[in-house]
Amino acid sequence: MDSAQHGLDPRSELVLDTHELGRRPGASRHVQTTAPAPTGLGLAVIGVPPESEVELDVRLESVVEGVLVTGTAVVQLRGECVRCLGEVSRDLTVDLQELYVYPGSDAEADEASRLQGDLLDLEPILRDQVVLDLPYRPLCRDDCEGLCATCGANLNDDPDHGHEEPVDPRWAAIAGLALEQDEQEQSKDR
């Protein structure tokens, strides 16, 4: 549901008040704050844990059409490596830039977000940018070796891990004869 269809909660740390900017083009305000991450910010394999910290560093600038928001957000990613299923944990910094137009503007909904009174909601642009910047195939490290296809051992923990080549069942009887012959020759040499 679009935030313009329901009231914004001014107590939410992702909702910013632009009242002090007025409608004077050129007026600006710098905001550095930490807010809890909204739920559902990510994909099945990797995302931002709900209620984890989002560090915001944004500039609100009054322009003729509304308020231009530019800056960055830093979020903590948690997920699972697609190769070894180990934990993936890292910071992600995303760039934010959005024009919030004044109520009554002719701007289309897909062109700009709308101010609700003097309030603007950063959650939709934060959500869009984080999801777009998430790694499609998260890795615990760039050179992750993954898991052994035969037994499931983590190849990062044991890089020399290996298995004997399996014997083709059609040749198993002959391999058994060869093994038996080797054992007989070794017992003669003793």
Image (cartoon, grey):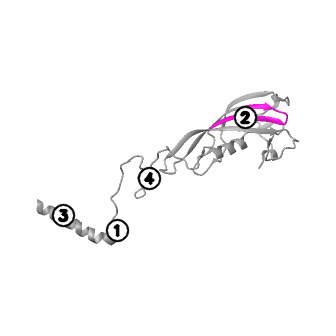
Label 2 and label 1: CA atoms lie apart by: 63 Å
The amino acid beneath tag 1 is Asp
Precedes in sequence: disc 2 or disc 1: 2
The front one of 182 and 81 is 182
| Residues at discs 1 and 4 in contact (Cβ within 8 Å) | no
Label 4 and label 3: CA atoms lie apart by: 35 Å
Precedes in sequence: disc 3 or disc 2: 2
Q: Residue at x 61, y 50 (%)?
A: 43
Residues in magenta?
A: 59-74
> Which mark is on residue 33?
none
Which residue is disc 3 drawn over?
183
Q: Is residue 29 left or right of residue 102?
A: left
Which residue is disc 2 drawn over?
70
Number of other residues with Cα within 10 Å of mark 4, as a class: few under 14, some 14 to 19, many 20 or more: some
The front one of 93 and 16 is 93
Q: Is residue 97 left or right of residue 20?
A: left
